[in-house]
């Protein structure tokens, strides 16, 4: 059974304090690993897709990396506007459906 | 270009009532999805449609039916609502490997 686990559940940072969010996954064959951002009361907003171990992608203060068992979302010098829930999802080559983790709620205080 | 739209935004039902959640996309995508999101559980797939005229069950299909009316529209129907169906429902459509989400419908079943 496909499984995606995110940690920590919640994270509070001071503005400028860098950190990383973890996503560990178990799938029979990984087609893609996805990161989304979700603001309160809104739908998930696509951030990144990673396809193979060693791949990295960046967007502003965010960088996503992928290993054979985990993905990390690194947040460098975060700002209050980075506060959101960050969701990780894995797509299995066999099922062609996303399995989501339960998310990390990030709060960045000024 | 509105992306993925959902109606209604919020609905209150009594146990046993029926309703249909509407979803439309204007991006000419073939695949469309329905998820539910509950606290602490992440998004779970209810049904999906790989193309017009086809639908398949996801992880939690019981109590729901779907219709892929045309390429643009994918509706989700609750025939006899139960309190366990209180949730936030998201529709998504897919381009290449990435799913794009609507703003969600918040459903409360009393």
Image (cartoon, rainbow, N blue to C red):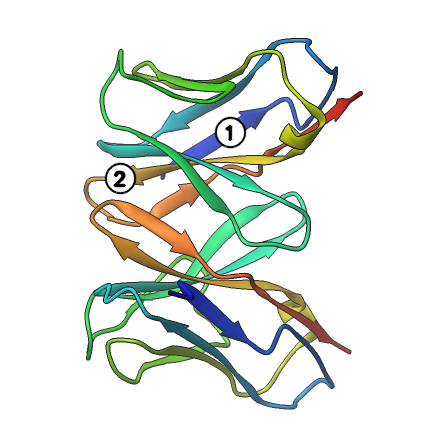
Q: Which residue is mark 1?
A: A5
- Above or below residue A90? Residue A15 is above
| Mark number displayed over residue A92 | 2
Whole-percent x, y for residue B67 in the image = 34, 82
User: Residue at 50% of width from left, 76% of height from top?
Assistant: B63
Q: Is residue A9 left or right of residue A101?
A: right
Could you say where residue B45 lies in the image, as x and y percent from the top left?
42, 57
Q: Position of residue B55 (x, y in %)?
A: 26, 72
Number of numbered discs overlaid on the protein picture: 2
Vertical arrangement, residue B110 with respect to residue A29, above or below: below
Snapshot quadrant of residue A94: top left
Q: Are marks 1 and 2 in contact (CB under 8 Å)?
A: no
Question: Which chain does tag 1 point to?
Answer: A
Residue at the spot 20% in from the left edge and 40% down from the top edge: A93
Answer with mark 1 or mark 2, whichever residue precedes in sequence: 1
| SS at circle 1 | strand
Viewer-closest of A1 and A65:
A65
Q: Residue at x 47, y 70 (%)?
A: B5
């Amino acid at each position: 059974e496909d499984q995606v686990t995110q940690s920590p559940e919640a994270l509070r940072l001071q503005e400028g304090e860098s950190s990383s969010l973890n996503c560990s996954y178990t799938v029979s064959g990984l087609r893609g690993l996805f990161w989304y951002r979700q603001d309160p009361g809104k739908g998930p907003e696509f951030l990144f897709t990673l396809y193979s171990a060693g791949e990295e992608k960046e967007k502003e203060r965010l960088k996503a990396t992928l290993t054979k068992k985990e993905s990390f979302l690194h947040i460098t010098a975060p700002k209050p506007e980075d506060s959101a829930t960050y969701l990780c999802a894995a797509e299995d080559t066999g099922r062609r459906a996303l399995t989501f983790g339960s998310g990390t709620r990030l709060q960045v205080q000024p | 270009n509105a992306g993925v739209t959902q109606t209604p935004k919020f609905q209150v039902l009594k146990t046993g009532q029926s309703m249909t959640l509407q979803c439309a996309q204007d991006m000419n995508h073939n695949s469309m999805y329905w998820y539910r999101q509950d606290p602490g559980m992440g998004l779970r797939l209810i049904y999906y449609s790989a193309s017009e005229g086809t639908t398949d069950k996801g992880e939690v299909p019981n109590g729901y039916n779907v219709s892929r009316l045309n390429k643009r529209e994918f509706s989700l129907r609750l025939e006899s609502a139960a309190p366990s169906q209180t949730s936030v429902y998201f529709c998504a459509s897919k381009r290449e490997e990435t799913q794009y989400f609507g703003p969600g419908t918040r459903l409360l079943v009393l």
